[in-house]
Image (cartoon, rainbow, N blue to C red):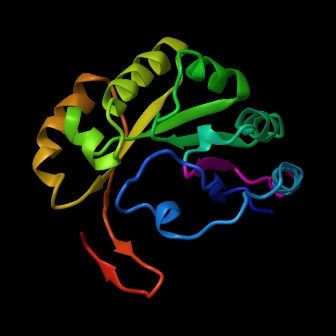
Amino acid sequence: MLEQLRIEWEITAACPLSCPDCSSRQMEHGADLAFSRQLEVVDRLVAAKVSLVSLSGGEPLAHPRWEALARRLAGGGVAVQMLTSASVWDAMTARRMKDAGVGRVWLGIDATGAAHDRFRGQPGLWDRVVGAVADLRAAEVPMGVFTTVRSRTVHGLEALARWVRDNGVTDWFLWAAVSGDRTGAVSGD
């Protein structure tokens, strides 16, 4: 069995953002896997006794049935996490996550304020992230932050570190950006 296996599952390529390093943005995608097939994947993961599945994307909250996938995984004894940009967040999202069995949420935050909005390509996203943090805290859903470090955002890490600390975030992952294209060319920025 796969009891120790932890899986990150891109349930959709859909995302309203234009982050420069995102593989979902750089690749051509067909339609997402049909929901019935996704349920088959869930059932196989449950049967294999996988310990944890992190739902990601694109933007997993953009998947119209993310709650059903999370609920089925959690109901089968699999710990569920979600990696989100909060780009499609609303006031009920944190409560819906908790009700669906999502045990931890990872927020993609690359800078503070307008710098974050510019990096992710969506004005107002920082305010949405700040609201998501408050909503998650109110719903008592544990959260962490993941940050893509690039030359154009590294100068803001100190301010982001203060924000992370001041907002009670206990886990912060820093990832080095590595961009590539379909030709195989890779760059660090």
Residue drawn at x 41%, y 16% as measured from the top left:
134
Q: How many marks?
A: 0
Residue drawn at x 31%, y 64% as measured from the top left:
177
Residue drawn at x 67%, y 40% as measured from the top left:
79
Residue drawn at x 27%, y 32% as measured from the top left:
164
For the view shown, which residue lies furthest in the top direction? 138
164 over 146 or under it: above or below: above
Residue 156 occupies which quadrant of the picture?
top left
134 over 171 or under it: above or below: above
Q: Which residues are the magenta region?
A: 45-58
Percent x, y of residue 55: 62, 47
Q: Is residue 20 left or right of residue 154?
A: right
Q: Is residue 156 left or right of residue 73?
A: left
Viewport quadrant of the C terminus: bottom left
Percent x, y of residue 144: 41, 37
Viewport quadrant of the N terminus: bottom right
Nearer-the-camera pick, 54 or 131: 131
Percent x, y of residue 9: 65, 56
Q: Is residue 100 magenta?
A: no
Percent x, y of residue 73: 78, 41
Nearer-the-camera pick, 135 or 6: 135
Nearer-the-camera pick, 152 or 75: 152
Q: Is residue 16 left or right of residue 157?
A: right
162 over 183 or under it: above or below: above
